[in-house]
Image (spheres, rainbow, N blue to C red):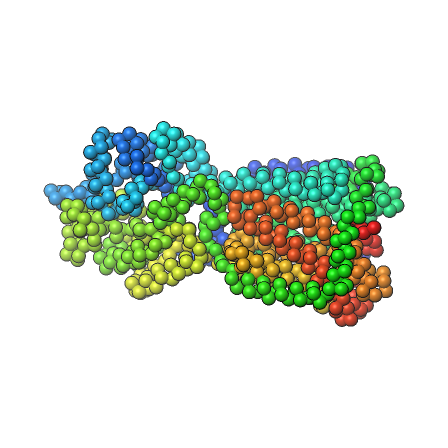
């Protein structure tokens, strides 16, 4: 029976590939066509990433809130801060702008200055009634002065909602229909209606209109993700192809590699469509990632072919050896890389699961494409010309190889001391790492919509909703005066918190009702006494507008109330302190036997999601280390060798984590991926080195030093070249406008560079120092898996 992954197995695979060229190519074309049909299923996410599992307590509370009060992220805010705004023409134009939006099918309601109404006491009918501040349109400056006086001085209910009386900043609130907030209709409204209308208004009135709110932010952020997918793909293709051409000086080889990785990208997009996954800020990274990972595969295969051709001049034999000799090693390196990504599948986060599934499948797919397409294409091409093989004779890398060998021979103690110093410094740096749960930190910081977020933070203390839901445990319990007083106490704490905006709730409405009962006297803007409450409630019950006024603050049963405040973009530490203060106040004010009070909202959900991811980082990284340790155990059947192989790959991760601490790069959803990705890729070099080392041991009759230096000379160049490709490939992500993507690219690039040096210097040093313990025939007996057969698999220019 043929054993998997042995030499005989790969001989069979080689024959199957080379004898069924046309069938395989047609099969690839059909598969590519079928997967391309699934592109239409791809859709871009219309919500911000929910990092928590669906069954997490925080998500359950948030969904319970949505069930009671509907989507809380349906508010778009327009703002103007301009001394010339308060003119007849501009104020009327502003009001007309609001009327235009009201006519749109996507809009539920618009609240502008013209829509504000006074709550008036109707003594004759013993009820409250509403009268508009502006009945038709503004006709004089005197009318504007009267309006400003009333709004800014007499009606605190509206303060900090549609205006800031200190800075005279004016806002308009556009509430979208809740059922379209997380659909493509929202995008159509923002892109095709809102933005053009605002631009036209700005041009006609010479005003700078600020726009914000979660629907607007989500739409523009998603559009930036879409725009950057194409940018990353083009940049990754350009950078890797330039490096590839620099190595090979062959347009033919470069073009073949580009064909392979382009098909790989098409398959990746097809996989996303086939699985009906959304394109998020994470899955958007996978297509360029496949290019970066695929090019080293192409380098190994093409260089091995050219090396074999130069060696014996037989094209068919060369292509067969490409598959038999490089196929297994490339399979193992791709499997370890895929394993690093696949560990995310085992987390409970839907976002990370989808990323892990698509990335691991795509990496295995690009391996299969490389192994099939490259040998088959070369069977149709003529024999390589001399100029195609010139790069095999390059001597410029000799100095680098000499330096590595000299360091391992003469400076081993220096290498160890340096490693220990780096380890200690990194551990100190790790303790300085902060965790960031900011919703907008990774967004393009120079973009207009992020600048507008900062504007509304300065003027109105934020735009990210934080909700507090009060369950009175009985119907109509919200309107009890004791409940209102408790809510008022909690709101006082919120008002005193500078990172939070003035809260909006039924309490403000009841205060406004008392003010109206006393004919608009501002000193009565307060909760009524027990005696006043009965009179005021009797007026409220007779008011036809009562239901409309209450529906956004109290549910239909009167059992649940909401307190809405908006939060600035603050870090996780501050958010946790604020949450702790609010919870302390809740526990003090609301007896648990009578009330059930929960905090929720997008801001809190995202912050909790970030904390959850940090816990999962340890799990996913541990799983990646375990999986790769199992690969090493299967290859070498040696516990000591597993430890020796893991040390050079764990040290770069610690160094990178230390750098994050020193440079102030926080742990967040984007940077949290660095470690598993980098570990899965960097261990490839270790596999190549140790596999070649084992081969050298067998060839040199277990002479340790000869074998280590032989492996170092043979693999050093290949590890250097692939590391250069990966370094510049991941550096492509630093051109992103998203801070998290930039950090991800820079950190993975730095980690892989550290890993290359660690595998070239520390790994051989450890092997030499521990040679007596790990290099004997009993420990390094021939395993069942034939990783790399007799001849050199390191298909790069050897030192001449």
Q: Position of residue 679 (x, y in %)?
A: 64, 57
Q: Position of residue 64 (x, y in %)?
A: 39, 53
The residue drawn where x is 30% and y is 44% is 167
Residue 562 visible in image:
no
Q: In the rendered view, does 741 fall on the left or right side of 304?
A: left
Q: In the rendered view, does 268 fall on the left or right side of 491?
A: right
The residue drawn where x is 19% and y is 41% is 129
Please determine whether, in this image, residue 496 is positioned above or below residue 311: below
Please determine whether, in this image, residue 371 is positioned above or below residue 572: above
Compare residues 193 and 556 and report the one nearer the observer. Answer: 193
* Number of numbered discs overlaid on the protein picture: 0
Residue 250 visible in image:
yes
The residue drawn where x is 53% and y is 42% is 225
Q: Residue 18 sits in which quadrant? A: top right
Quarter containing the N terminus: bottom right
Q: In the rendered view, does 654 fall on the left or right side of 327?
A: left
Q: Position of residue 582 (x, y in %)?
A: 35, 60
Q: Position of residue 462 (x, y in %)?
A: 37, 48
């Amino acid at each position: 029976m043929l054993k998997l992954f042995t030499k005989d197995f790969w001989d069979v695979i080689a024959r199957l590939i080379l004898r069924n060229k046309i069938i395989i190519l047609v099969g690839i074309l059909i598969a590519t066509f079928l997967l391309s049909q699934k592109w239409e299923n791809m859709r871009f996410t219309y919500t911000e990433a929910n990092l928590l599992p669906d069954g997490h307590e925080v998500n359950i509370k948030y969904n319970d809130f949505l069930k009671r009060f509907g989507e809380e992220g349906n508010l778009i805010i327009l703002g103007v801060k301009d001394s010339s705004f308060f003119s007849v023409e501009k104020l009327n134009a502003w009001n007309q702008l609001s009327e235009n939006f009201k006519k749109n099918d996507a809009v539920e309601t618009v609240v502008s200055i013209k829509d504000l109404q006074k709550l008036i006491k109707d003594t004759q009918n013993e009820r409250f009634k509403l009268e508009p501040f502006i009945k038709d349109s503004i006709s004089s400056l005197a009318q504007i002065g009267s309006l400003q006086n009333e709004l800014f001085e007499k009606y605190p209910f509206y303060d900090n909602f549609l205006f800031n009386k200190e800075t005279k900043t004016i806002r308009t609130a556009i509430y979208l229909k809740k059922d379209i907030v997380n659909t493509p209709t929202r995008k159509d409204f923002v892109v095709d209606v809102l933005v053009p209308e605002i631009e036209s208004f700005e041009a006609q009135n010479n005003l700078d209109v600020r726009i914000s709110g979660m629907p607007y932010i989500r739409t523009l952020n998603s559009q930036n993700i879409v725009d950057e997918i194409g940018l990353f793909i083009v940049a990754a293709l350009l950078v890797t192809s330039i490096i590839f051409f620099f190595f090979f000086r062959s347009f033919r080889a470069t073009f073949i590699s580009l064909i392979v990785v382009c098909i790989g990208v098409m398959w990746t997009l097809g996989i996303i469509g086939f699985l009906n996954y959304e394109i998020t800020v994470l899955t958007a990274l996978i297509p360029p990632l496949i290019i970066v990972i695929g090019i080293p595969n192409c380098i190994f295969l093409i260089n091995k072919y050219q090396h074999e051709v130069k060696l014996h001049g037989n094209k068919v034999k060369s292509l067969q050896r490409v598959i038999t000799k490089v196929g297994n090693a490339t399979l193992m390196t791709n499997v370890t890389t895929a394993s690093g990504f696949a560990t995310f599948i085992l987390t409970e986060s839907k976002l990370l699961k989808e990323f892990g599934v698509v990335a691991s499948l795509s990496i295995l797919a690009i391996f299969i494409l490389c192994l099939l397409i490259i040998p088959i294409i070369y069977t149709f091409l003529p024999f390589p010309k001399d100029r195609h093989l010139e790069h095999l004779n390059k001597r410029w890398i000799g100095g680098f190889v000499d330096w590595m060998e000299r360091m391992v021979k003469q400076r081993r103690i220096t290498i160890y001391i340096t490693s220990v110093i780096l380890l200690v410094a990194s551990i100190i740096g790790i303790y300085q790492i902060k965790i960031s749960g900011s919703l907008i930190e990774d967004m393009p910081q120079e973009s207009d919509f992020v600048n507008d977020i900062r504007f509304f933070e300065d003027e109105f203390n934020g735009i990210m909703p934080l909700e507090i839901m009060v369950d009175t445990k009985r119907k109509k319990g919200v309107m009890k005066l004791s409940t209102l007083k408790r809510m008022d106490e909690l709101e006082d704490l919120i008002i005193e918190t500078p990172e939070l905006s003035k809260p909006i709730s039924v309490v403000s409405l009841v205060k406004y009702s008392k003010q109206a009962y006393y004919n608009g006297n501002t000193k009565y803007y307060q909760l009524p006494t027990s005696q006043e409450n009965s009179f005021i409630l009797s007026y409220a019950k007779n008011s036809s507008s009562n239901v409309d006024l209450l529906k956004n603050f109290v549910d239909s049963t009167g059992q649940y109330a909401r307190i809405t405040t908006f939060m600035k973009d603050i870090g996780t530490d501050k958010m946790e302190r604020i949450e702790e203060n609010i919870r302390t106040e809740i526990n003090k004010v609301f007896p648990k036997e009578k009330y059930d009070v929960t905090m929720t909202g997008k801001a809190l959900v995202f912050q909790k999601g970030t904390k959850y991811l940090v816990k999962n980082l340890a799990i996913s990284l541990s799983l990646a280390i375990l999986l790769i340790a199992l690969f090493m155990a299967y290859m070498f059947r040696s516990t000591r060798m597993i430890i020796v192989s893991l040390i050079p790959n764990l040290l770069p991760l610690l160094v990178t984590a230390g750098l994050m601490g020193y440079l102030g790069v926080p742990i967040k959803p984007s940077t949290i991926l660095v470690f598993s990705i980098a570990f899965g890729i960097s261990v490839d070099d270790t596999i190549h080195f140790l596999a070649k080392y084992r081969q050298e041991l067998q060839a040199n009759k277990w002479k340790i030093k000869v074998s280590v230096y032989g492996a170092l000379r043979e693999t050093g160049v290949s590890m250097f070249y692939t590391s250069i490709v990966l370094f510049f490939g991941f550096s492509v992500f630093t051109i992103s406008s998203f801070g998290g993507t930039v950090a991800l690219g820079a950190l993975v690039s730095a980690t892989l560079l550290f890993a290359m040096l660690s595998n070239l210097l520390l790994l051989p040093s450890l092997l030499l120092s521990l040679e007596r313990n790990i290099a004997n025939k009993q420990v390094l007996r021939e395993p069942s898996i034939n990783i790399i057969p007799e001849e050199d698999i390191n298909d790069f220019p050897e030192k001449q």
